Image (spheres, grey):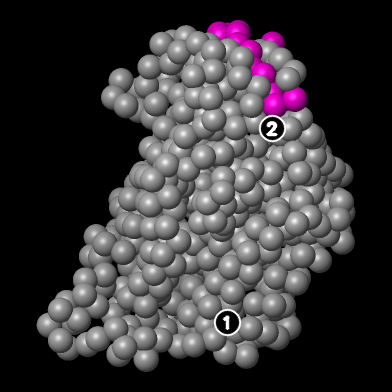
Amino acid sequence: MASLESWCWGPMAMRASAGSPKQRDPNKIANGDNTAQGKWGRAWEVDWFSLASVIFLLVFAPLIVYYFIMSCDQYGCSLTAPVVEMVTGKSSLSDIWAHTPGVTARAAQIYVTWVTFQVVLYMMIPDFCHKFLPGYVGGVQEGAVTPAGMVNKYEINGLQAWLITHLLWFANAHLFHWFSPTIIFDNWIPLLWCANILGYTVSTFALIKGYLFPTNAKDCKFTGNFFYNYMMGVEFNPRIGKWFDFKLFFNGRPGIVAWTLINLSFAAKQQERFGSVTNAMILVNVLQALYVVDFFWNETWYLKTIDICHDHFGWYLGWGDCVWLPYLYTLQGLYLVYHPVQLSTPHALAVLLLGLAGYCVFREANHQKDLFRKTDGNCQIWGRKPKYIECSYVSADGRRHRSKLMVSGFWGLARHLNYTGDLMGSLAYCLACGFSHLLPYFYVIYMSLLLVHRCLRDEDRCSRKYGRDWERYTTAVPKRLLPGLF
């Protein structure tokens, strides 16, 4: 959901990142004088807080996912009922676990077919959408320069994969009837175990690959701490062959392609259970589909975001994209299967307008930054030539690069106003579910914590990268998310 040469910011992201560990030679930051590779990406050395954060996430993130899904399956989406029953002795952990469906052959077959199909779409069908869709950029594209000075090429065909997948989904629902549209909901928990197996498998393989046969050894980082290496990753851009890029595939496929299919399956289940689909379910499907389609429409732009430009590939991305994203980003639709909400017309319109306004802020802010980067500042932002601060930095190969940090348009109001748009959209998804339960509001709470932390993490990285030039920029644009407040 920006460019390495500009602000080091990312899209609507799902990941809860670890603390900000130490970098080697932290004092050598003035205008990029430090050429050490540790200045970009994740840490070389791990302090005790970072290690504690990593272990906490490795242990509790899977439990959080299980708790939310189990709460809906066994307790009608109540987050407090399981705790109350265990405290009062009415139930126990073993009782809850005994009522949890396990992995099934049917779920395994569905999941293997799904992932294989997405690999085929990613690897074997070159993009043709860019040939007939005006404004869409697909096909072979270059990513940003890596810390070691490499430039990778990518086959951008996510929009095509999304379109093919959904055309087949609707064709099945209305013509072929190979499987029920409720198939995802009906196998939701067994599929959770399959997603976990893939998430842990790909994360473990990426760690082993980073040690034994990395794609580019110069873009690897080793801290000497197994847990940090496993979670945050060793290899920057692990690949198999020329085109299968772990980051691009798992960040976008299969999780984000599945997001809208999951919501459609939830809507089908609501129709099956109650005889109709509520306007709240329609709003959740429409607003989240808007984000998903935007993500794939701008997949080339995504190559310049924090996920591709800075994060190494480990459990943080591998497991997170396989499990955390599809299971916790779809909580609103899941909740509405158990608690159908029919909103009043004013409430529904308010949710729709908030969601669209958030999307417009998010997209226009990103568009301004992308336009500024592509034209090197020779453009119009809000009807006038943009203002900027010139700066420089040094990459790990010792080369000095010049850059410009824009201080006009949305980027003159706050340093991360695109994140503000994210939060407006996140709140809209939750408000569509009414006010009876806390569970659907987890998303906006989580996104608020994540994006505030990501602001701090981005700015710490940019401070190391740009040194005194970054101080000049923060003086010119003093607020992070909310103009005049924060």
The residue labelled by disc 2 is 147
Which residue lies at the image location 21% right of the left edge and 75% below the top edge?
83
Q: Position of residue 25 (x, y in %)?
A: 53, 25
Region rendered in magenta: 378-397
Q: Position of residue 369 (x, y in %)?
A: 60, 25
Q: Position of residue 397 (x, y in %)?
A: 75, 25
Please tell me which residue is depicted at 32% across the width and 57% down the height of the picture. Answer: 441
Q: Which quarter of the picture shows residue 121?
A: bottom right
Mark 2 lies on a secondary structure that is: loop
Asked if residue 59 shows in the view, the reply is yes
- Residue 183 is tagged as 1
Image: 34 above or below 422 = above
Q: What secondary structure is the magenta-colored segment mainly?
A: loop
Q: Is residue 258 above or below residue 291?
A: below
Where, by quadrant of the figure, is residue 118 drawn?
A: bottom right
Where on the picture, by quarter, is residue 87? bottom left
- Residue 322's disc is none
Taking depth in this image into account, of 399 and 363 the one nearest to the observer is 399
Amino acid at the residue labelled 2: Pro
The kind of residue on which mark 1 rests is Ile
Camera-nearest residue between 135 and 38: 38
Seen at 56% across and 45% down, the residue is 223
Left or right, 438 with respect to 155, comes to left
Q: Residue at 40%, 86% (x, y): give it.
A: 100
Which quadrant holds the N terminus? top right
